[in-house]
């Protein structure tokens, strides 16, 4: 007789066991399915397969950087930052990147120094004039190409306000492609590169002596071809008489004459006067990183140090600092702190020398251009005042001055009778010539002519500029 299997009922003891088994399977599947789904999602991402879109994330807002005349230098959120003017003022503006540990997105330049303000969505309006900035960069680049120079830089200041109309450095780079840029091109040379200025320092010695009553403009100064001071012999480059007027000491850029004048000061006094013009002092510019140059402690000077500083060696400066110092001569003796951003709060102007001393030196600097070989720096139809400087380049690796390497500078202002512009240009280590008269003076003229032409067509441009281009 065949055996029959019992039909399970609610009271059958096999039912609870089977239910436990089914429940175990369900629990296991509940644990495994999410894991499999996660693995599938990871595999889909790795293979490029589409995945469900994440929720929209709002881009981080960032303010715009503009020039005074409205040219946009940087705009857009941090994850899509754009630099519409490409390389224009690139070394000044800088660039952004991923969020840093400090909470900043700005990595270089104004993008870095103004990061907090830009993150709040506030715009930053610079004092730069886009046309003047572009002209300065174009002529600097042409000079570097023509002379084989390592670099060049320029600062254009508006007299009376201290507004920086141009702060140009070459080589430069496009912040849109900063990852491919040469680090050397990122240097903001106009504000940060320190160099020994050379003979552009001499007018400050004259101004200080006039102001202190130790010199009169009509004196004759001994100017021998060579002069031994301490352990060093100083020489003049240009041929001239062994005695010159004060104005001709500047015209011929006589080293021996300038040193003879500086010896009327004790070292502590000379140091104090050079510092009064801003050398070796921090610039009160809150909007950008600058450097103060160097001015050694006079207690450590030996006789040749005193002489060297009088002719612009042994002391270092930047284009911006030198421009601010020349502006003292242009502004009838007042030091006006430079500004790079509209609305910047800077210290009040302060007097360094009297209007009479400043005007006397300005007259001498006009004579320096009109009576000598510096007519190549004079702007057509406009009285121009200025001075050249040729300085040895210190090489830290050598522990001394590098043979055959020079920084060539021209510092000047126009119109000379009532200056509205001060400009400093420097060409670093040119190969074709070591003469500031040949290299730096024509560069000053080229940029200055662009400034005059730009102002002449401006509705509110000065009358002298319109007259000059007729």
Image (cartoon, grey):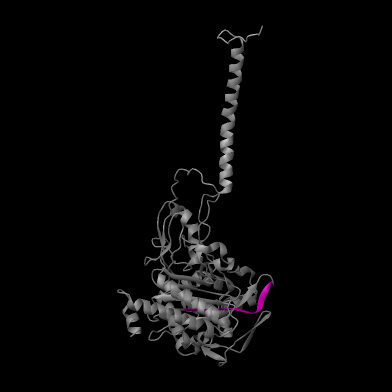
Q: Quadrant of the C terminus?
A: bottom left
Q: Is residue 46 magenta?
A: no
Q: Say whether residue 250 is visible.
A: yes
Viewer-nearest residue: 205 or 383: 383
Q: Is residue 410 magenta?
A: yes
Which of the 4 quarters of the picture holds residue 337? bottom left
Point out residue 319 in the picture as x, y percentages from the top left corner. 51, 72
Q: Say whether residue 208 is visible.
A: no
Q: Quadrant of the N terminus?
A: top right
Point out residue 20 in the picture as x, y percentages from the top left corner. 60, 17
Question: In the image, is residue 323 above or below residue 42?
Answer: below
The residue positioned 62% from the left and 75% from the top of the image is 393
Viewer-nearest residue: 186 or 125: 186
Question: In the image, is residue 363 above or below residue 422?
Answer: below
Point out residue 357 in the picture as x, y percentages from the top left corner. 44, 78
Which of the 4 quarters of the picture holds residue 344? bottom left
Point out residue 316 in the picture as x, y percentages from the top left corner. 57, 71
Which of the 4 quarters of the picture holds residue 29? top right
Q: Residue furthest front?
A: 1
- Magenta range is 398-411
Q: Is residue 267 left or right of residue 331?
A: right
Main SS category, magenta section = strand
């Amino acid at each position: 007789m065949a055996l029959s299997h019992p039909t399970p009922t609610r009271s059958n003891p096999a039912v609870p066991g089977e239910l436990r088994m089914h429940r175990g399977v369900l629990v296991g599947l509940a644990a495994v399915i999410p894991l499999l789904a996660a693995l599938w999602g990871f595999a889909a991402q790795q293979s490029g397969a589409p995945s469900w879109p994440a929720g929209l994330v709002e881009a981080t807002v960032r303010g715009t950087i503009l020039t005074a005349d409205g040219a946009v230098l940087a705009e857009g959120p941090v994850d899509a930052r754009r630099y519409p003017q490409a390389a224009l003022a690139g070394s000044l503006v800088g660039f952004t990147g991923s969020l840093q540990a400090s909470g900043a997105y700005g990595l270089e330049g104004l993008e870095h120094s103004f990061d907090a303000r830009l993150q709040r969505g506030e715009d930053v309006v610079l004092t730069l004039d886009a046309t003047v900035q572009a002209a300065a960069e174009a002529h600097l680049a042409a000079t570097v190409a023509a002379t084989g120079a390592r670099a060049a830089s320029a600062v254009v200041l508006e007299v009376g306000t201290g507004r920086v109309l141009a702060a140009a450095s070459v080589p430069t780079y496009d912040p849109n492609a900063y990852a491919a840029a040469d680090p050397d091109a990122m240097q903001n040379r106009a504000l940060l590169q320190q160099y020994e200025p050379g003979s552009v320092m001499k007018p400050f010695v004259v101004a200080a002596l006039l102001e202190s009553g130790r010199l009169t403009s009509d004196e004759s100064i001994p100017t021998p071809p060579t002069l031994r001071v301490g352990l060093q012999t100083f020489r003049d480059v240009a041929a001239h008489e062994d005695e010159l007027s004060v104005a001709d000491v500047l015209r011929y850029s006589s080293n021996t004459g300038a040193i003879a004048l500086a010896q009327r000061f004790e070292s502590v006094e000379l140091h104090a006067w050079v510092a009064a013009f801003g050398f070796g002092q921090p610039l009160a510019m809150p909007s950008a990183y600058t450097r103060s140059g160097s001015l050694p402690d006079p207690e450590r000077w030996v006789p040749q140090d005193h002489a060297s500083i009088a002719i612009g060696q042994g002391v270092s400066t930047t284009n911006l600092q030198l421009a601010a110092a020349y502006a003292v001569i242009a502004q009838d003796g007042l030091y006006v702190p430079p500004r790079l951003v509209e609305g910047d709060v800077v210290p009040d102007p302060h007097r360094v020398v009297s209007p009479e001393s400043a005007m006397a030196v300005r007259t001498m600097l006009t004579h320096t251009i009109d009576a000598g070989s510096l007519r190549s720096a004079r702007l057509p139809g406009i009285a121009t005042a200025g001075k050249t400087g040729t300085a040895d380049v210190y090489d830290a690796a050598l522990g001394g001055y590098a043979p055959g390497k020079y920084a060539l500078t021209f510092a000047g202002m126009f119109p000379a009778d009532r200056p509205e512009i001060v400009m400093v240009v420097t060409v670093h280590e040119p190969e074709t010539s070591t003469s500031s008269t040949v290299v730096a003076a024509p560069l000053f003229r080229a940029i200055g002519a662009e400034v005059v032409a730009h102002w002449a067509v401006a509705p509110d441009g000065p009358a002298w500029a319109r007259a000059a281009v007729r």
